[in-house]
Amino acid sequence: MKKQSGATVVEFALVLVIFLTFLLGITDFSRMLFTWAAANEATRAGARYAVVCDDTTKQAQVLTKMQTMLPQISAISLAWAPAGCSAATCAGVTVTITSLNYQWISPIAGSVKLAGIPMPVFSTYLPREMMRQDPNSAAICS
């Protein structure tokens, strides 16, 4: 019996390491799903801002509005349809997140790929009929 006095502590330590690995993996996966959903919502909000505020030149302001929802967004593109239109003649806008990397927090996965995992391209299109129509308020443009 004396030879097995520390066996329980060793078994507990081994199980704890496995349990914490699974827990960090679940947490990281949940964060990745949250980032995915927030990127979808940020593109929708960016397209809405671009369309409602009726401005075809202020890509930096659209990026700033999108970064309030997801600070990791570093680059976007605005594509007005048809190309080269003015605010009065545009048919709609497509907002696309062109560069978004997900950063792991767990030390095992984080050390494997320090630059992050590239997320897919997120894109939203809103038609011209939405421009300058905000029934609740025009506060989005300020």
Image (tube, rainbow, N blue to C red):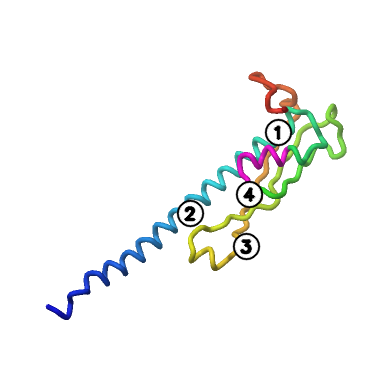
User: Is label 3 in a helix, a strand or a loop?
Assistant: loop
Camera-side mark, 2 or 1: 2
Is 67 magenta? The answer is yes
Residue 140 highlighted magenta (yes or no): no
Tell me: 15 left or right of 2. Answer: right
Q: Mark 3 or 1, which is nearer the eye? A: 3
- Residue 76: x percent and y percent? 72, 46
Structural distance between the alpha carbons of marks 4 and 3: 13 Å
Quick one: label 2 or label 4, which is nearer the N terminus? Answer: 2
Where residue 83 is drawn, which disc sits there? none
Give me the C-alpha separation between circle 3 and circle 1: 32 Å
On residue 126, the disc is 1
Place residue 8 in its image quadrant.
bottom left
* Disc marking residue 29: 2
Q: Which residue is mark 3?
A: 115
* Residue denoted by label 4: 72
Instruction: Identify which amino acid the numbered label 1 is placed on.
Output: Leu
Mark 4 residue crowding within 10 angstroms, few (<14) / some (14–19) / many (20+): some
Instruction: Quadrant for the N terminus, please.
Output: bottom left
Q: Count all numbered tags in the image, as a single digit.
A: 4
Part of the protein shown in magenta: 62-71
Q: Secondary structure under badge 4?
A: loop
11 relative to 73, above or below: below
